[in-house]
Image (cartoon, rainbow, N blue to C red):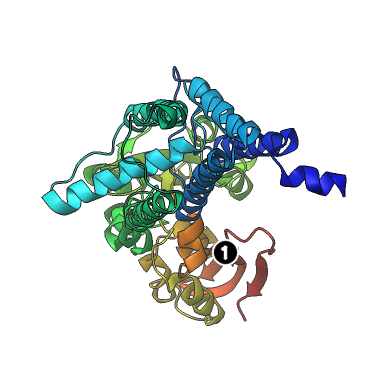
């Protein structure tokens, strides 16, 4: 009973709890990286989500309301605890911004949004220093007000003294305005990072940037090389189409080239260096693609030709891109995942291989090709890699908490073998699942051509 009565009055316990609450929210701002650390190295400039900003604003109003009530009721211990908490936050603001920093970081974003909305002129986002110093000024002013106003009441120097309800109403209205404007600003500038805008986030990638489209001409050169023909004649055509002959042999090519997706191991299994008795020639072509328009750098295609002592071509390989392969299929097309699965399931033994590959060549699949002569038959094999992921519809909670929507992801590894242009076998291994849902294991599927 004594403890209950003690808590009803102004007490050191209440003062400590008030101080601890403000400190805890300051720590929350730091932990969520919406605050900053070290003025010499301000690497944190993360805007709060709409939900987190609303929480900070509500907490700020609650602290102000508590301070006014404590002053009115003469709760000196609690009032001093609030002053000490704000004073320590002000002094520490040169290192850690506290929960007031994300509020004014959001206000700075609102100013940018309103400026562009009114003027119609795009303006670069403010540097970290702008919200940093606004925050410093705000905390110093807050600290001064908390100290000056109580003393001014005794001196009667300030004639206008709004009531606690008026102050709370004004702060609440301002907070609602800040939150609403911030919702639009956050949606436009922050939530869809690093893709910039919602439209770009959901946009399907242009087919012009898919690997098969970029290297179409080089793949046609490869297709024109015929097994059983003279290497000298083929080489003239290959070099005439812009390929450069490498000095490196096949084994040196494997050693020197850093290939993605374990293709070096795949090549070593396909043509083991210690078992290859034919001579070889490596031809390289570089497609330079502007990084600003897509997700590629240079796309280097290779044709590798194996020939016997008489110069007759026995086998050939086509590698779409070596050294730096970045599949551009993420967000490429909302249908490619399901359509690829349906496409493979629909393949049948005896189907025309080239005609059957027309669909997959229209995606951003990485298609590794090999052709050789076995027992008088032309045998072709294809190793196909395809990633396809796209965002699902965003929910309201994504907007409030600043999270990106779940992604449906497909990962395909497909192998197809054909003889004399007809499919004889093939396998597909697929993983399908939600990228952002870590509690759900991806669905796996293995299929074979019937």
Q: Quadrant of the C terminus?
A: bottom right
Image quadrant in which you'd find residue 2: top right
Q: Which residue is mark 1?
A: 415
Name above or below for residue 156 compared with residue 217. above
Q: In the depicted view, which residue is nearer to us: 83 or 182?
A: 83
- Residue at screen point 62% across, 69% down: 427
Q: In the depicted view, which residue is nearer to us: 399 or 255?
A: 399
Q: In the depicted view, which residue is nearer to us: 151 or 204?
A: 151
- Residue 176: x, y in percent? 38, 57
Name above or below for residue 335 compared with residue 241. below
Q: Going by the image, does 260 lie left or right of 172? A: right
- Residue 55: x, y in percent? 52, 51
Q: Does dot 1 land on a helix, a strand or a loop?
A: strand
Name above or below for residue 80 compared with residue 432. above
Q: Going by the image, does 151 lie left or right of 441? A: left
- Residue at screen point 38% across, 32% down: 246
- Residue 327: x, y in percent? 44, 52
């Amino acid at each position: 009973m004594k403890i209950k009565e003690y808590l009803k009055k102004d007490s050191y316990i209440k003062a400590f709890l008030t101080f601890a609450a403000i400190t805890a929210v300051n720590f929350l701002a730091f932990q969520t990286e919406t605050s900053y650390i070290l003025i010499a190295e301000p690497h944190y400039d993360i805007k709060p989500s709409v939900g987190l900003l609303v929480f900070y604003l509500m907490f700020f109003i609650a602290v102000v309301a508590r301070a006014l009530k404590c002053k009115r009721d003469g709760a000196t211990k609690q009032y001093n605890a609030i002053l000490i908490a704000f004073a320590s936050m002000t002094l520490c603001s040169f290192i850690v911004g506290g929960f007031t920093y994300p509020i004014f970081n959001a206000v700075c974003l609102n100013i940018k949004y309103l400026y562009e909305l009114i003027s119609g002129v795009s303006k670069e986002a403010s540097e970290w220093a702008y919200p940093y110093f606004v925050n410093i000024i705000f905390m110093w002013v807050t600290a001064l007000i908390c100290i000056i106003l109580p003393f001014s009441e005794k001196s009667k120097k300030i004639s206008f003294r709004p009531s606690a309800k008026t102050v709370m109403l004004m702060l609440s209205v301002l907070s609602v305005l800040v939150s609403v404007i911030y919702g639009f600003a956050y949606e436009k500038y922050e939530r869809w990072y690093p893709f910039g805008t919602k439209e770009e986030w959901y946009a399907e990638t242009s087919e012009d940037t898919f690997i098969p489209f970029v290297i179409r001409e080089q793949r046609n050169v490869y297709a024109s090389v015929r097994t059983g023909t003279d290497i000298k004649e083929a080489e003239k055509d290959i070099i005439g189409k812009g390929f450069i002959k490498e000095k490196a042999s096949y084994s040196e090519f494997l050693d020197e080239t850093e290939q993605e997706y374990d293709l070096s191991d795949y090549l070593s299994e396909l043509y083991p260096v210690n078992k290859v008795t034919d001579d070889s020639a490596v031809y390289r072509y570089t497609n330079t693609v502007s990084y600003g328009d897509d997700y590629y750098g240079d796309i280097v295609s290779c044709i590798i030709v194996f020939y016997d002592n008489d110069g007759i071509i026995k086998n050939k390989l086509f590698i779409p891109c070596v050294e730096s392969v970045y599949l551009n299929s993420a967000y490429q097309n909302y249908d490619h995942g399901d359509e690829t699965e349906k496409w493979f399931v629909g393949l049948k033994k005896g189907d025309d291989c080239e005609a059957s590959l027309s669909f997959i060549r229209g995606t951003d699949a990485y298609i590794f090709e090999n052709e050789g002569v076995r027992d008088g038959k032309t045998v072709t094999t294809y190793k196909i890699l395809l990633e396809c992921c796209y965002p699902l519809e965003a929910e309201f909670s994504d907007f409030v908490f600043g999270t990106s929507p779940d992604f449906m992801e497909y990962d395909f590894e497909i192998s197809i073998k054909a003889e004399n242009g007809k499919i004889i076998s093939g396998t597909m291994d697929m993983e399908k699942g939600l990228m952002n849902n870590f509690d759900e294991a991806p669905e796996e599927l293995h299929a074979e051509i019937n």
